[in-house]
Image (spheres, rainbow, N blue to C red):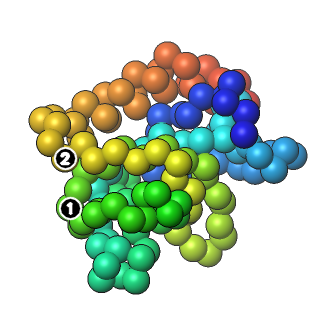
Amino acid sequence: MDYSLAAVKMLISQLRDAKPTPSQNATALGGVLFQRAWLQGVLVSDPVISGGRMVLDDGTGLVELSLSNDFALRQWKSGMYLMVVGVYHIRTGDMPLLKVHKMVDLSGRPDREAMWYLEVMDAYRLFYEPLIQEFS
């Protein structure tokens, strides 16, 4: 993994526009090349009830989370507000998949969801929008 490519703050709906690149280790969103996506949202499926399957909802879409053993052993519950960073895998005919390598429970943070939307908008306007428009 190339850690010189930052994790891109984005909404799940933006993942729909991401395209594979010739390098199997990266994905492109317009002119923005990334390996890892940074998402935040509410856990909507309880891993105990759903047989280990975890789904995150940020209000714009759903993404399935694939957890390493370290994260799978923790107590994640439906309704938690989570920050997740991981490798995005494009799948046709199924929900997008994020192979998680960082996951933090932000449920105790006031205004966390409203602030996240503002962070994503700010990053998009400052960094991503010019590149995306250039390659559109």
Q: Residue at x 57, y 25 (%)?
A: 128
Q: Residue most toward the top?
A: 126
Circle 2 SS class: loop
> Does the residue at mark 1 contact the one at mark 2 (Cβ under 8 Å)?
yes
What residue is disc 1 on? 79
Would residue 53 appear left or right of 14 to someone viewing this image? left
Q: Quadrant of residue 48?
A: bottom left
Q: Amino acid at mark 2?
A: Ser
Mark 1 or 2, nearer chain start: 1
Figure check: 48 above or below 116: below
Give the image location of residue 108, x and y in percent: 14, 42
Q: Quarter of the image containing the C terminus?
A: top right
In this orientation, which residue lies closer to the viewer: 101 or 90? 101
Which quarter of the rendering shows the N terminus? top right
- On the picture, is 126 further left or further right than 111? right
Indicate the position of residue 123 as horizontal and vertical percent values: 46, 23
Q: Residue at x 50, y 63 (%)?
A: 69
**Which residue is tagged 2?**
107
Q: Is residue 68 above or below residue 107?
A: below
Horizontally, residue 54 falls left or right of residue 8, namely left
The spot of residue 109 in percent (x, y) is 16, 37
Asked if 90 appears above or below 133 in the picture, the reply is below
- Between the residue at mark 1 and the residue at mark 2, the CA separation in whole angstroms equals 9 Å
Residue type at mark 1 is: Gly
Please say whether residue 88 is visible from this viewpoint: yes
**Where does the image place residue 115, in percent across and percent down from the top left?**
25, 31
Foreground: 118 or 88? 88
Label 1 sits on a secondary structure element that is loop
